[in-house]
Image: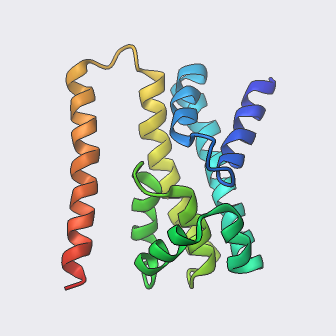
Amino acid sequence: MWGPALLSLLFILQTFLAFIPGQALMVASGYIYGFSGGVLITWISLVLGGQMAFWLARRYGRPFAEKWIAPEILNRWDKSAAGQGIPFYVVTLVMPFFPNDAMCYIAGLGNMNHRRFLVANTLGRGIASLLTVLVGAFSEQIPGLIWIAIVCFVILGTLGWFTARRYAGT
């Protein structure tokens, strides 16, 4: 009974405390609660934590965000996010190499309204939850070749996104 509540709290806290490993929690959620239970706990908690970070950054501004996210990260990603919409935030909330939680603060500091961010947050966190919890829920059944395909997909997706951003800027 207390397990899902504690796990939800950890997911919400990891939005504010960088030392809590979000992806590891997501895999553990699938391993402990299975695919359906793990996705439900993970998705709801991550969306709630992301919306809280968005709202608090919007309400209290950059000084608040800098208490949780390094100013260099905020500066770098604030420039990349300027003028971006829902698809940009969906991608940054899905890919494990992006500062997912920082993107919630950045969206709150930017021009995106809360409804559009809720859509991006729900989609991005949902996709990330499905993919990562799947690994935990079925880790014993996933053959090595699929693991290689998953890793290649993530690497190629990340490289593709950076390449597209580079050429879009020229």
Q: Given the current orientation, which residue lies at the most extreme top position?
A: 140
> Residue shown at 21%/60% (left/top)?
160
Q: In the image, is residue 22 above or below residue 64? A: above
Across and down, in percent, residue 9 comes to 75, 41
Farthest-out residue, right: 2
Position of 69 with respect to 13 (left or right) is left
Q: Which of 7 and 16 is in front in this view?
A: 16
Image quadrant in which the C terminus is located: bottom left
Q: What residue lies at 48% left-to-right and 23% top-to-bottom?
A: 137
Give the residue drawn at x 27%, y 37%.
151
Horizontally, residue 64 falls left or right of residue 124, namely right
Camera-side residue of 23 and 71: 71
Q: Where is residue 44 in the image (x, y as percent from the top left)?
A: 65, 46
Image quarter of residue 20? top right
x then y, percent, for residue 68: 68, 61
Q: How many marks?
A: 0
Residue 4's x, y, as percent? 72, 30
The color scheme shown is rainbow
- Looking at the rendering, in which quadrant would you find the N terminus? top right
Residue displayed at 59% across by 45% down: 43
Picture quadrant where residue 52 is located: bottom right
Residue 156 located left or right of residue 88: left
